[in-house]
Image: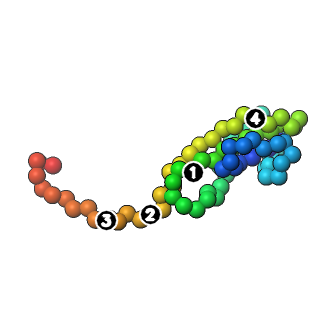
Amino acid sequence: MTGYYLSTSSTAPTAGAAGWVAVTATTSFSRNVAYTLASGDGIKTVYAWYKDGAGNVSARTSDSIRLDRTPASNGTLTATAGNAR
């Protein structure tokens, strides 16, 4: 592997597309990468591809998160005695 590409679009990039992040050639890769999601609440999906030195692009992989930036409307918890709990 010589590079990775992250996007919120599921369309595969070409090996020469802008946006590829180059890495030192390796057969095993692991990295935490910051990625800024589009504004607004809802399901957000990030897609990733990898390429090798010959320009072959991998199959797509992805992961999703539910983004909810709305503060809780009632942050109060009240305990009520009963049932021996």
Dot 4 corresponds to which residue?
58
Dot 2 corresponds to which residue?
70
Asked if labels 3 and 1 touch by Cβ distance under 8 angstroms, the answer is no
Dot 1 corresponds to which residue?
44
Disc 4 residue crowd, few under 14, some 14–19, many 20+, Cα 10 Å: some
- Amino acid at pointer 4: Ser
- Amino acid at pointer 2: Thr
N-term-proximal mark, 2 vs 4: 4
Q: Nearer the viewer, mark 1 or mark 3?
A: 1
Q: Is residue 26 visible?
A: no
Whether residue 6 is situated above or below residue 77 in the rendered picture:
above
Dot 3 corresponds to which residue?
74
- Amino acid at pointer 3: Asn
Q: Is residue 21 left or right of residue 73?
A: right
Disc 1 residue crowd, few under 14, some 14–19, many 20+, Cα 10 Å: some
Relative image position of residue 67 (x, y in whole percent):
51, 55
| Residue at 61% in and 57% down | 37
Q: Is residue 63 left or right of residue 18?
A: left
Q: Is residue 60 left or right of residue 52?
A: left
Asked if labels 4 and 2 touch by Cβ distance under 8 angstroms, the answer is no
Name the disc covering residue 78, or none.
none
**Judging from the image, what secondary structure is the residue with disc 4 in?**
loop
Relative image position of residue 79 (x, y in whole percent):
19, 59
N-term-proximal mark, 3 vs 4: 4
Q: CA distance from mark 2 to mark 4?
A: 37 Å
